[in-house]
Amino acid sequence: MTGGTGFLGRRIVERLVGQGRAVTVMARRPAPDLEARGVRFVACSLEDAAAVRDACRGMESVYHVAAKVGVWGRRSDYFAANVLGTRAVLDGCRAHGVRRLVHTSTPSVVYNGQSLAGVDESLPLTTGCPSAYPVTKAQAEEEVLGANGSLLSTVALRPHLIWGPGDPHLVPRILDRANAGRLRIVGEGRNRVDMVHVENAADAHIAAERALAAGRSGGRAYFITNGEPVFLWDWINGLLCALGRPAVTGRIPLWAASAAGGVLEAVWSLLPLGGEPPMTRFVAAELAKDHWFDISAARRDLGYAPRIDMATGTAELVARLRAGT
Protein backbone atom coordinates (compact mmCIF):
# COMPACT_ATOMS: atom_id res chain seq x y z
CA MET A 1 0.00 0.00 0.00
CA THR A 2 1.54 3.27 -1.07
CA GLY A 3 0.25 6.19 0.95
CA GLY A 4 -1.02 3.86 3.65
CA THR A 5 -0.65 6.44 6.41
CA GLY A 6 -2.85 9.03 4.68
CA PHE A 7 -6.53 9.80 5.15
CA LEU A 8 -7.85 7.19 2.69
CA GLY A 9 -4.91 4.81 2.74
CA ARG A 10 -5.10 4.34 6.50
CA ARG A 11 -8.78 3.36 6.26
CA ILE A 12 -7.97 0.74 3.63
CA VAL A 13 -5.06 -0.61 5.69
CA GLU A 14 -7.29 -0.95 8.75
CA ARG A 15 -9.83 -2.93 6.71
CA LEU A 16 -7.17 -5.27 5.35
CA VAL A 17 -5.62 -5.82 8.78
CA GLY A 18 -9.11 -6.54 10.13
CA GLN A 19 -9.44 -9.26 7.48
CA GLY A 20 -6.27 -10.86 8.83
CA ARG A 21 -4.16 -9.98 5.82
CA ALA A 22 -0.45 -9.21 5.91
CA VAL A 23 0.02 -5.58 4.91
CA THR A 24 3.11 -3.58 3.98
CA VAL A 25 2.80 0.20 3.95
CA MET A 26 5.10 2.45 1.94
CA ALA A 27 5.04 6.08 3.07
CA ARG A 28 7.30 8.97 3.99
CA ARG A 29 6.57 8.90 7.72
CA PRO A 30 6.15 5.88 9.99
CA ALA A 31 2.88 5.05 11.73
CA PRO A 32 3.69 3.38 15.06
CA ASP A 33 0.02 2.56 15.71
CA LEU A 34 -0.21 0.56 12.47
CA GLU A 35 3.15 -1.11 13.09
CA ALA A 36 1.88 -2.14 16.53
CA ARG A 37 -0.89 -4.03 14.73
CA GLY A 38 1.62 -5.97 12.63
CA VAL A 39 1.82 -3.71 9.60
CA ARG A 40 5.27 -3.72 7.97
CA PHE A 41 6.52 -0.21 7.22
CA VAL A 42 8.82 0.89 4.38
CA ALA A 43 10.05 4.49 4.53
CA CYS A 44 10.10 5.72 0.95
CA SER A 45 8.86 8.51 -1.32
CA LEU A 46 7.39 8.04 -4.77
CA GLU A 47 10.40 9.81 -6.24
CA ASP A 48 12.72 6.99 -5.12
CA ALA A 49 12.05 4.64 -8.02
CA ALA A 50 14.38 1.86 -6.91
CA ALA A 51 12.90 1.73 -3.41
CA VAL A 52 9.35 1.82 -4.78
CA ARG A 53 10.08 -1.10 -7.09
CA ASP A 54 11.72 -3.06 -4.29
CA ALA A 55 8.76 -2.47 -1.95
CA CYS A 56 6.58 -4.50 -4.36
CA ARG A 57 8.65 -7.62 -3.72
CA GLY A 58 6.58 -10.49 -2.32
CA MET A 59 3.22 -8.75 -2.75
CA GLU A 60 0.09 -10.38 -4.21
CA SER A 61 -1.77 -7.09 -4.57
CA VAL A 62 -0.68 -3.46 -4.56
CA TYR A 63 -2.88 -0.51 -3.69
CA HIS A 64 -1.31 2.64 -5.14
CA VAL A 65 -2.96 5.43 -3.15
CA ALA A 66 -0.08 7.89 -2.74
CA ALA A 67 0.16 10.94 -4.98
CA LYS A 68 1.17 14.57 -4.99
CA VAL A 69 -2.14 16.38 -4.63
CA GLY A 70 -3.08 20.04 -4.74
CA VAL A 71 -4.02 22.76 -7.16
CA TRP A 72 -0.71 24.59 -7.38
CA GLY A 73 2.95 23.76 -7.77
CA ARG A 74 5.67 23.02 -10.27
CA ARG A 75 4.59 20.67 -13.04
CA SER A 76 7.90 18.84 -12.72
CA ASP A 77 7.12 17.95 -9.09
CA TYR A 78 3.69 16.58 -10.01
CA PHE A 79 5.18 14.64 -12.91
CA ALA A 80 7.89 13.12 -10.72
CA ALA A 81 5.46 11.90 -8.07
CA ASN A 82 2.35 11.06 -10.07
CA VAL A 83 3.74 9.81 -13.38
CA LEU A 84 7.26 8.61 -12.62
CA GLY A 85 6.16 7.29 -9.21
CA THR A 86 3.35 5.31 -10.83
CA ARG A 87 5.76 3.94 -13.43
CA ALA A 88 7.99 2.73 -10.59
CA VAL A 89 4.99 0.97 -9.02
CA LEU A 90 4.18 -0.66 -12.36
CA ASP A 91 7.81 -1.70 -12.81
CA GLY A 92 7.81 -3.19 -9.32
CA CYS A 93 4.60 -5.10 -9.99
CA ARG A 94 6.00 -6.56 -13.21
CA ALA A 95 9.41 -7.36 -11.73
CA HIS A 96 8.04 -9.15 -8.69
CA GLY A 97 5.02 -10.95 -10.11
CA VAL A 98 2.31 -8.87 -8.43
CA ARG A 99 -1.06 -10.09 -9.65
CA ARG A 100 -3.34 -7.11 -8.91
CA LEU A 101 -2.93 -3.32 -8.85
CA VAL A 102 -5.65 -0.99 -7.55
CA HIS A 103 -4.78 2.56 -8.51
CA THR A 104 -6.34 5.61 -6.86
CA SER A 105 -7.06 8.18 -9.54
CA THR A 106 -9.36 11.23 -9.44
CA PRO A 107 -12.42 12.47 -11.36
CA SER A 108 -10.44 15.57 -12.30
CA VAL A 109 -8.71 13.43 -14.94
CA VAL A 110 -11.73 14.21 -17.14
CA TYR A 111 -11.69 17.97 -16.48
CA ASN A 112 -12.65 19.87 -19.63
CA GLY A 113 -13.59 23.29 -18.30
CA GLN A 114 -17.31 22.53 -18.63
CA SER A 115 -19.97 21.50 -16.14
CA LEU A 116 -19.98 17.73 -15.68
CA ALA A 117 -23.50 16.58 -14.82
CA GLY A 118 -24.05 12.83 -14.49
CA VAL A 119 -21.20 11.91 -16.84
CA ASP A 120 -19.81 8.38 -17.01
CA GLU A 121 -16.42 6.83 -17.70
CA SER A 122 -16.73 7.29 -21.46
CA LEU A 123 -15.62 10.92 -21.08
CA PRO A 124 -12.09 11.38 -22.49
CA LEU A 125 -9.12 12.18 -20.28
CA THR A 126 -8.10 15.81 -19.90
CA THR A 127 -5.37 17.26 -22.03
CA GLY A 128 -5.68 20.97 -21.24
CA CYS A 129 -6.35 21.48 -17.54
CA PRO A 130 -4.65 24.60 -16.09
CA SER A 131 -3.58 22.57 -13.04
CA ALA A 132 -0.74 20.04 -13.17
CA TYR A 133 -2.43 17.61 -10.77
CA PRO A 134 -5.26 16.43 -13.09
CA VAL A 135 -2.98 16.26 -16.12
CA THR A 136 -0.36 14.11 -14.40
CA LYS A 137 -3.00 11.91 -12.77
CA ALA A 138 -4.62 11.41 -16.18
CA GLN A 139 -1.32 10.25 -17.62
CA ALA A 140 -0.74 7.94 -14.66
CA GLU A 141 -4.20 6.42 -14.96
CA GLU A 142 -3.76 5.84 -18.68
CA GLU A 143 -0.48 4.02 -18.09
CA VAL A 144 -1.93 1.89 -15.28
CA LEU A 145 -4.90 0.76 -17.35
CA GLY A 146 -2.67 0.22 -20.38
CA ALA A 147 -0.60 -2.21 -18.28
CA ASN A 148 -3.56 -4.51 -17.67
CA GLY A 149 -2.96 -8.00 -18.99
CA SER A 150 -2.78 -11.69 -18.21
CA LEU A 151 0.06 -11.34 -15.69
CA LEU A 152 -1.04 -8.11 -13.97
CA SER A 153 -4.66 -7.01 -13.59
CA THR A 154 -5.15 -3.29 -13.03
CA VAL A 155 -8.09 -1.05 -12.15
CA ALA A 156 -8.36 2.70 -11.47
CA LEU A 157 -10.79 4.28 -9.02
CA ARG A 158 -11.79 7.96 -9.15
CA PRO A 159 -13.09 8.96 -5.69
CA HIS A 160 -14.44 12.50 -5.65
CA LEU A 161 -13.93 14.96 -2.78
CA ILE A 162 -13.19 12.45 -0.02
CA TRP A 163 -14.41 13.66 3.37
CA GLY A 164 -15.31 12.41 6.83
CA PRO A 165 -13.88 12.42 10.37
CA GLY A 166 -10.15 13.04 10.29
CA ASP A 167 -10.25 14.74 6.88
CA PRO A 168 -7.04 16.81 6.67
CA HIS A 169 -7.89 18.57 3.42
CA LEU A 170 -11.42 19.40 2.25
CA VAL A 171 -13.35 20.47 5.36
CA PRO A 172 -10.38 22.08 7.17
CA ARG A 173 -9.74 24.14 4.05
CA ILE A 174 -13.37 25.30 3.98
CA LEU A 175 -13.34 26.19 7.67
CA ASP A 176 -10.01 27.99 7.50
CA ARG A 177 -11.14 30.14 4.60
CA ALA A 178 -14.47 30.87 6.26
CA ASN A 179 -12.74 31.86 9.50
CA ALA A 180 -10.45 34.20 7.57
CA GLY A 181 -13.38 35.77 5.73
CA ARG A 182 -11.95 34.59 2.41
CA LEU A 183 -14.80 32.33 1.28
CA ARG A 184 -17.06 33.59 -1.50
CA ILE A 185 -19.78 31.90 -3.53
CA VAL A 186 -18.35 31.64 -7.03
CA GLY A 187 -20.89 31.86 -9.84
CA GLU A 188 -24.62 31.40 -9.32
CA GLY A 189 -24.18 29.13 -6.31
CA ARG A 190 -26.49 26.39 -7.60
CA ASN A 191 -23.86 23.99 -8.89
CA ARG A 192 -24.21 20.37 -7.87
CA VAL A 193 -21.24 18.27 -6.85
CA ASP A 194 -20.59 14.71 -5.76
CA MET A 195 -18.60 13.80 -2.68
CA VAL A 196 -17.62 10.48 -1.14
CA HIS A 197 -17.34 9.56 2.51
CA VAL A 198 -13.93 8.10 3.31
CA GLU A 199 -15.43 4.81 4.53
CA ASN A 200 -17.31 4.41 1.25
CA ALA A 201 -14.12 5.15 -0.68
CA ALA A 202 -12.31 2.46 1.33
CA ASP A 203 -15.13 0.00 0.59
CA ALA A 204 -14.71 0.68 -3.12
CA HIS A 205 -10.99 -0.07 -3.02
CA ILE A 206 -11.51 -3.37 -1.24
CA ALA A 207 -14.27 -4.26 -3.71
CA ALA A 208 -12.02 -3.40 -6.64
CA GLU A 209 -9.29 -5.77 -5.50
CA ARG A 210 -11.91 -8.47 -4.98
CA ALA A 211 -13.21 -7.91 -8.51
CA LEU A 212 -9.71 -8.23 -9.97
CA ALA A 213 -9.17 -11.47 -8.04
CA ALA A 214 -12.39 -12.78 -9.59
CA GLY A 215 -11.19 -11.89 -13.08
CA ARG A 216 -13.41 -8.84 -13.50
CA SER A 217 -12.88 -5.11 -14.12
CA GLY A 218 -9.29 -5.30 -15.35
CA GLY A 219 -8.32 -2.30 -17.46
CA ARG A 220 -11.32 -0.27 -16.30
CA ALA A 221 -11.73 3.06 -14.49
CA TYR A 222 -14.63 3.82 -12.13
CA PHE A 223 -16.07 6.98 -10.63
CA ILE A 224 -16.59 6.55 -6.88
CA THR A 225 -18.98 8.89 -5.05
CA ASN A 226 -21.77 8.80 -2.52
CA GLY A 227 -24.23 8.82 -5.41
CA GLU A 228 -25.99 11.82 -3.85
CA PRO A 229 -24.99 15.05 -5.60
CA VAL A 230 -25.52 18.09 -3.38
CA PHE A 231 -25.75 21.79 -4.05
CA LEU A 232 -22.21 22.67 -3.06
CA TRP A 233 -22.87 26.01 -1.41
CA ASP A 234 -25.98 24.75 0.41
CA TRP A 235 -23.89 21.92 1.87
CA ILE A 236 -21.06 24.27 2.86
CA ASN A 237 -23.44 26.75 4.49
CA GLY A 238 -25.30 23.95 6.25
CA LEU A 239 -22.01 22.73 7.68
CA LEU A 240 -20.98 26.23 8.78
CA CYS A 241 -24.34 26.95 10.41
CA ALA A 242 -24.32 23.60 12.22
CA LEU A 243 -20.97 24.62 13.69
CA GLY A 244 -22.32 27.98 14.79
CA ARG A 245 -20.50 29.96 12.13
CA PRO A 246 -21.99 32.50 9.73
CA ALA A 247 -23.10 31.36 6.32
CA VAL A 248 -21.25 32.47 3.21
CA THR A 249 -23.20 35.24 1.48
CA GLY A 250 -20.56 37.12 -0.51
CA ARG A 251 -20.47 36.36 -4.21
CA ILE A 252 -18.12 36.71 -7.13
CA PRO A 253 -18.95 35.97 -10.79
CA LEU A 254 -17.13 33.02 -12.32
CA TRP A 255 -15.52 35.19 -14.98
CA ALA A 256 -14.08 37.48 -12.30
CA ALA A 257 -12.83 34.59 -10.16
CA SER A 258 -11.25 32.96 -13.19
CA ALA A 259 -9.59 36.21 -14.27
CA ALA A 260 -8.29 36.78 -10.75
CA GLY A 261 -7.00 33.21 -10.70
CA GLY A 262 -5.08 33.74 -13.92
CA VAL A 263 -3.47 36.91 -12.57
CA LEU A 264 -2.58 35.31 -9.25
CA GLU A 265 -1.09 32.27 -10.98
CA ALA A 266 1.15 34.60 -12.99
CA VAL A 267 2.23 36.47 -9.86
CA TRP A 268 3.01 33.24 -7.97
CA SER A 269 4.96 31.98 -10.98
CA LEU A 270 7.09 35.10 -11.19
CA LEU A 271 7.70 35.83 -7.52
CA PRO A 272 9.14 33.59 -4.76
CA LEU A 273 5.87 33.43 -2.85
CA GLY A 274 5.09 30.54 -0.53
CA GLY A 275 1.99 28.38 -0.47
CA GLU A 276 -0.59 28.54 -3.22
CA PRO A 277 -2.52 31.46 -4.74
CA PRO A 278 -5.79 32.31 -2.97
CA MET A 279 -7.55 31.58 -6.27
CA THR A 280 -6.65 29.69 -9.45
CA ARG A 281 -8.53 29.13 -12.69
CA PHE A 282 -9.01 25.46 -11.84
CA VAL A 283 -10.39 26.20 -8.37
CA ALA A 284 -12.74 28.86 -9.77
CA ALA A 285 -14.24 26.33 -12.17
CA GLU A 286 -14.54 23.66 -9.46
CA LEU A 287 -16.36 26.06 -7.13
CA ALA A 288 -18.83 27.27 -9.75
CA LYS A 289 -19.61 24.36 -12.05
CA ASP A 290 -21.36 21.01 -11.76
CA HIS A 291 -19.19 17.98 -11.22
CA TRP A 292 -21.21 14.91 -10.39
CA PHE A 293 -20.89 11.48 -11.89
CA ASP A 294 -22.73 8.32 -12.87
CA ILE A 295 -21.55 5.50 -10.59
CA SER A 296 -23.70 2.76 -12.12
CA ALA A 297 -20.60 1.00 -13.51
CA ALA A 298 -19.04 0.74 -10.04
CA ARG A 299 -22.32 -0.53 -8.63
CA ARG A 300 -22.63 -3.13 -11.38
CA ASP A 301 -19.04 -4.33 -11.75
CA LEU A 302 -17.64 -3.90 -8.26
CA GLY A 303 -20.78 -4.38 -6.21
CA TYR A 304 -20.11 -0.93 -4.77
CA ALA A 305 -22.92 0.37 -2.55
CA PRO A 306 -22.30 3.52 -0.45
CA ARG A 307 -22.97 2.59 3.18
CA ILE A 308 -22.77 6.05 4.76
CA ASP A 309 -25.14 8.58 3.20
CA MET A 310 -24.53 12.31 3.09
CA ALA A 311 -26.94 13.16 5.93
CA THR A 312 -25.54 10.54 8.30
CA GLY A 313 -21.94 11.36 7.44
CA THR A 314 -22.46 15.10 7.80
CA ALA A 315 -24.16 14.71 11.19
CA GLU A 316 -21.27 12.54 12.42
CA LEU A 317 -18.72 15.02 11.10
CA VAL A 318 -20.46 17.95 12.81
CA ALA A 319 -20.57 16.04 16.11
CA ARG A 320 -16.86 15.23 15.87
CA LEU A 321 -15.91 18.81 14.98
CA ARG A 322 -17.98 20.16 17.86
CA ALA A 323 -16.22 17.75 20.20
CA GLY A 324 -12.83 18.75 18.78
CA THR A 325 -11.98 15.21 17.66
Image: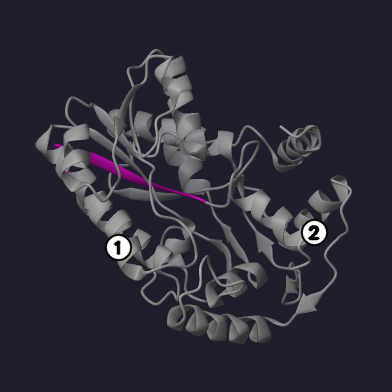
Q: Assess whether residue 152 is covered by the magenta stretch.
A: yes
Check if mark 2's residue and mark 1's residue have beta carbons within 8 Å: no
Q: Is residue 226 above or below residue 312?
A: below
Which label lies toward us, 2 or 1?
1
Q: Residues within 10 Å of mark 2 (few under 14, many from 20)?
A: some
Task: Please give the name of the residue rendered at 36% of the width and 74% of the height, measured from the top-left corner.
Answer: 127
Given residues 257 and 263, the one toward you in this image is 263
Q: Main secondary structure of the magenta part?
A: strand
Residue range highlighted in magenta: 149-159
Q: Is residue 119 above or below residue 19?
A: below
Indicate which disc, 2 or 1, sits on the residue closer to the N terminus.
Answer: 1
Residue 235 image point, x, y percent = 76, 54
Q: Secondary structure at mark 2?
A: helix
Q: How is the image coloured?
A: one colour
Q: Amino acid at mark 2?
A: Asp
90 lies left or right of 116: left
Q: Provide the residue designation for mark 2.
A: 234
124 lies left or right of 188: left
